[in-house]
């Protein structure tokens, strides 16, 4: 019985507190709801802009050496391509293939030309070419393990290329504004 009386006393005190503090409690509930809505809206916006994924194919042009296997394949038109798969801004992706110097009787130096904005074709979700140029000159960082490597005749190396899409906020806004869902670019490998 004593337990029941103390419970009733607590409930009575709580009811009086709620009655006196209605406005404060209502303000807290409304503030919490508004904060939740704003947080959800920001999360959705950031999810659309910062978690973009972009499909990519890189056409490879080779002069003076032969490349084969690994992640290389021929597209429907017979062009040699490197499928980068789906890329996320700020996340590096690595691909591999073999390079052999079987077209020259002398040592050659391998040179990979850098990917520049003028060399990139962006496509929107309707697979149409986007004509607006990107807001930055280097939307991608491409690195390789063979630039300036000397290959002797019939020597072969296992090549590694790493591609990273810029996470620059202006570039991400460009991707979102133009509804970009894919891109392609030419990789040029020269044996000099």
Image (tube, rainbow, N blue to C red):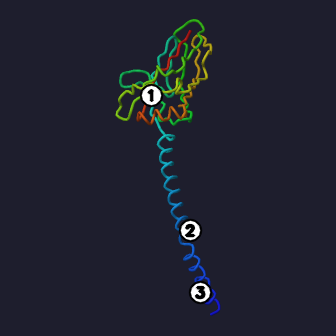
Q: CA distance from mark 3 to mark 2?
A: 24 Å
Q: In this view of the protein, which residue sits in the foreground, 123 or 76?
A: 123
The quadrant the C terminus occupies is: top right
**Image position, residue 72 (x, y; %):** 47, 26
Q: Earlier in the sequence, mark 3 or mark 2?
A: 3
Q: Residues within 10 Å of mark 1 (few under 14, many from 20)?
A: some
| Label 1 residue SS | strand
Q: Which residue is mark 2?
A: 24
Secondary structure of the residue carrying numbered label 2 = helix
| Front tag of 2 and 1 | 2
How many C-alpha atoms fall within 10 Å of the one at disc 2: few (<14), some, or many (≥20)? Answer: few
x and y, in percent, of residue 155 in the image: 59, 15
Task: Kindly indicate whether the residue at mark 2 contacts the one at mark 3 (C-beta within 8 angstroms).
Answer: no
Query: First in sequence: mark 3 or mark 1?
Result: 3
Quarter where residue 99 is shown? top right
Name the spot of residue 98 as percent of width and height, x first: 54, 22
Residue behind mark 3: 8
**Sequence order check: which comes first, mark 2 or mark 1?**
2
Foreground tag (3 vs 1): 3
Disc 3 secondary structure class: helix
Q: Which mark is residue 57?
A: 1
Where is 23 relative to 140, above or below?
A: below
Q: Is residue 30 left or right of residue 78?
A: right
Residue 53: image location, x then y, percent = 47, 38
Q: CA distance from mark 3 to mark 1?
A: 72 Å
Q: Nearer the viewer, residue 147 or 44?
A: 44
């Amino acid at each position: 019985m004593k337990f029941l009386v103390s419970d009733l006393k607590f409930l009575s005190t709580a009811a009086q507190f709620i009655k006196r503090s209605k406005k404060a409690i209502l303000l807290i509930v409304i503030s919490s709801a508004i904060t939740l809505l704003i947080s959800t809206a920001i999360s959705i916006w950031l999810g659309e802009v910062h978690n973009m994924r972009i499909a990519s194919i890189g056409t490879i042009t080779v002069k003076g050496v032969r490349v084969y296997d690994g992640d290389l394949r021929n597209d429907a038109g017979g062009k040699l391509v490197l499928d980068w798969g789906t890329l996320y801004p700020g996340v590096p992706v690595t691909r591999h293939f073999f390079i052999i110097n079987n077209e020259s009787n002398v040592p050659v130096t391998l040179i990979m030309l850098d990917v520049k904005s003028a060399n990139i074709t962006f496509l929107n979700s309707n697979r149409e070419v986007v004509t607006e140029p990107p807001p930055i000159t280097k939307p991608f960082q491409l690195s390789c393990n063979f630039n300036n490597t000397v290959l002797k005749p019939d020597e072969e190396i296992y090549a590694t290329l790493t591609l990273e899409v810029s996470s620059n906020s202006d570039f991400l806004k460009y991707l979102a504004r133009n509804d970009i869902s894919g891109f392609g670019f030419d990789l040029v490998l020269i044996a000099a």
